[in-house]
Image (spheres, grey):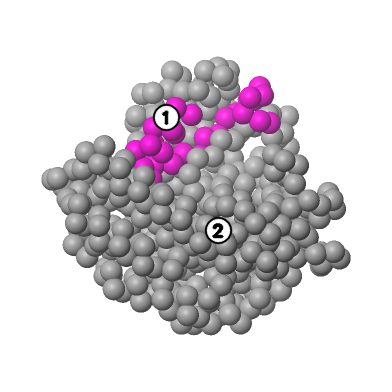
Amino acid sequence: MKKIAITTLGCKVNQYESAAFQTGFEEAGCVMVGPKEVADIIVINSCAVTARAGAQSRQAVRQLMRKHPEAKIVITGCYAQMEPQQLITLAAKPVCIVGNSNKDHLVQAALNETPCDLTMLMGKISKATEICRLPVRHFGNRTRACLRVQDGCHNFCTYCIVPYTRGPSRSLPLAETLDQAAVFAAEGHQEMVVTGINVGQYGKDLKDGSDCVNLMRALCLAHPQIRFRLSSIEPMEISDALLMLMTDHQNFMPHLHIPLQSGDDTILTRMNRRYTRQNFMTVVERCRQRLPEAAIGIDVLVGFPGETAQNFANTLALLEELDCTYLHVFPYSPRAGTLAATFDQQIPQAIKDERVARLRQLDTEKKELFYQRYVGTTRSVLVEHKRDPDGKLRGFTDNYIPVSFPGPQSLMNTITQVTIDNGCATQMSGHSVPDSHAR
């Protein structure tokens, strides 16, 4: 009975895939242990989306090898796909490296007593035509499960390494997606986050006419008692049909996360983002008109090569004007192999830091403004399994406001009505409405 530890870095897709590895190991009779416990096999699901993520992946490999000198080390994920030779050099002993297009072979490779076949397990990700089948039985001890429906991207934004590490867009057929959702529902998960590398492209590679709207409609109808939340979706993929579906189905949460990256047209062109500042503004305004109470999150990439003070000022002005809920702000970091890494006019780190700090301050202001709108209102909250540091229950409203409130253990993993009383940008406080939880 082998003991397995899994460390996951990066995105929700990685989280889903690590849950699939756990399912596979448990079905093979293995026991899962924490990263501080003695393990026979260590799996590291790495990330490479930023230079920092790559450094964290290398650090995780080094630390886990030191802590588990006798364990078999298996490395997968985007950093493993991008830099397998560097990982081999980094490791003080033979390691097993599994490419993203072969993650469905990871459990077998890890349990195999013979050395890994690096060539077979890496594969050519650019030639991948089908998504890896990675069924999950249970998404850990969480109220919210990630439902991976798509992998890969062919947008080739000039700053992004993901198309090179994840390959072209591939979708999980609708019937298989519904099967996985049914498993999560049977396991007691009250909410599912429908996720992918470019989830708005769902179905474009399938031959049955499926698309993102059809997918979300099918999920909402199949499981009316489950809350569904859509992960990040490109601005030009937000259709009127998608917004109408969100208004028509109460279990489709009013929450959109939309990548902007820059609010300046010159920088957007250099990024190969295929829309303008005005396009983005129109999309957000349409979302707010159709879904006045929705949470709208925006990704911003700061310090792209050639970003002048005026370019940044244009981004800041756009974000100040938009009626959004929160910002995810990232400093640009060059990724070898991307076009932007070859551009002149790389921005000094001190300037990046200053611009990031300004936008993160705006993020705080946006959150406080949005959250304060709902003081005195009552919203449905999915209560999580863990209490906050003050011993209160906590969870997120349908429109993604974090709220804590006093209550009994029996409310955990239920959807209950909570009246929001007060709070700040990090956490709102409230009180539950008696006898309001339906399940």
Q: Residue visible at 33% across and 52% down?
A: 301
Q: Report the quarter where the C terminus lies.
A: bottom right
Q: Residue at x 14, y 45 (%)?
A: 345
Q: Report the front residue among 84 and 276.
A: 276
State the extent of the magenta-drawn residues as a range. 33-60
Q: Could you give the CA–CA distance between mark 1 and mark 2, rounded to whole angstroms?
A: 26 Å
Residue drawn at (73%, 29%) of the image = 1
Three-letter code, disc 1: Arg
Q: Residues within 10 Å of mark 1 (few under 14, many from 20)?
A: many
Q: Is residue 223 left or right of residue 155?
A: right
Assign a secondary structure to mark 1.
helix
Find residue 24 and report its image quarter.
Answer: top right
Q: Which mark is residue 148?
A: 2
Q: Which mark is residue 58?
A: 1
Residue furthest to the left: 344
Q: Position of residue 310 (x, y in %)?
A: 19, 56
